Amino acid sequence: MTDLTPTFKSARRASVELALLSERVINRVLERVAHEAVARSSEILTANSRDLAQMSPENPMYDRLMLTPERLESIAADLRNVARLSSPVGETLSETTRPNGMTITKIRVPFGVVGVIYEARPNVSFDVFALCLKSGNACLLKGGSDARHSNEAIVRIIRESVEGEGLNPDIVTLLPADREATEAMLGAVGWVDVVIPRGSSALINHVRDHSRVPVIETGAGICHTYFDAEGDTDKGAAIVFNAKTRRVSVCNALDTLIVHSSRLADLPQLCGPLMTEGVTIYADPRAFAALEDGYPPELLEHATEESFGTEFMDYKMSLRTVDTLDEALEHISRHSSRHSEAIVTENRATADAFAARVDAACVYTNVSTAFTDGAQFGFGAEIGISTQKLHARGPMALPELTTYKYLIRGEGQIRN
């Protein structure tokens, strides 16, 4: 096993150098990386094609792994968006003056070295670099073997861009794609300040259970939309279609539609658009009966208990009938990953009750869950969606990559 301690030490040294950089220099680096991501797109796409050749297109991860010229243009736009944002570093969170005259100021500061472990999503390499740089952190990237060639090409371009601006390229480092590198990062106490896993429940659980370094969890996305007794059918059909089919492999995609029993007759209209994308529906008995004559039989199946609480990451969705709001909330509570939940209703009191009682990072009223995304929230990009409650929750961007410290100033005060 290769000793990665020298790599971790280099990242630590680079993080100290970052503290000396002006925001103008940081923005210049981000703009250069954005330019190079497009200018050298053929290099990235060639590497990506090597990774794609090793994965079946039927694999739900295939879409996450795939890069295209359009996606690289979007990535470049996100990099430029981050450059335009204000850095949170140095922001004053509070300031007080004590009776003895000393002042106590609480300010934002970087973590230092951030390690991110992720699977077949090479776009994460760009996102993590941009957000860490803008927040004053060095980053250690541990991508999965499925995206090894893509990540190598991306990080090579980033490091060459950083070096071209006269900065230490060790502010971003790609670790080997093997499991040993993961274990080394999880044990790098004193060198790595925080680890953020992005990926499957198995990955997240492993990191949480084995890391000696503090962890910020990002969770699997098991997302529900509840169509209420007073829901608007046109809004509901558009929201369900968008949340389910926009990109089926992402964590904010819809997994379960819950429908009030008084609206079962509207199911053919609510679910009709889904058939154009070949979405298979696993329906409970009442919903199955309501759809039986209005949805393609080859795409309609009877739900089992395993149909609920499943993150499909595919053109598949489960469908549950309830008689009350309480029953909908109980189902969500039992099966939710506390990521993103939505209600479609024209009743304000019902919407407010749903929003107050659902325990999730993001709760939507008459909006698609597809918006749980840092760029869509105006954060430029995101480092992950946190489903935990300590330090960060929901889309994590620049502020969530900082901690704080207290600055105490005085004129010689001593304590009695």
Image (cartoon, rainbow, N blue to C red):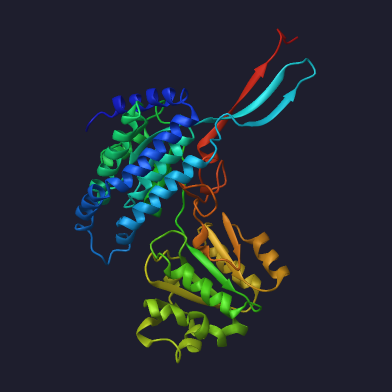
Q: Residue at x 70, y 64 (%)?
A: 352
Against 411, is 362 above or below? below
Expressed as whole percent of the image width and height from the top left, the position of residue 181 reads 29, 37
Quarter occupied by the N terminus: top left
Asked whether residue 270 is in view, the answer is yes
Picture layout, residue 138 above or below residue 220? above
Residue 133 horizontal/vertical position (percent): 43, 35
Which residue is outermost to the bottom? 293
Residue toward you, 259 or 368: 368
Query: In terms of depth relative to the viewer, which is nearer, 124 or 205?
Result: 124
Q: Position of residue 209 (x, y in %)?
A: 41, 43
Q: Quadrant of residue 208?
A: top left
The quadrant in which the C terminus is found is top right
Name the residue located 25 percent from the left edge and 52 percent from the top edge.
Answer: 45
**In this rendering, is residue 200 above or below 405?**
below
Residue at left offset 23%, top offset 57%: 52
Horizontally, is 225 left or right of 202 in the view? right
Relative image position of residue 221 (x, y in whole percent): 46, 59
Residue 255 appears in view: no
Judge by depth and name the residue closer to the eye, 416 or 233. 233
Q: Is residue 330 left or right of residue 7?
A: right
**Tag count:** 0
Q: Is residue 362 above or below residue 278?
A: above
Question: Seen in the image, is 37 located left or right of residue 216?
Answer: left
Classify residue 168 by image quadrant.
top left
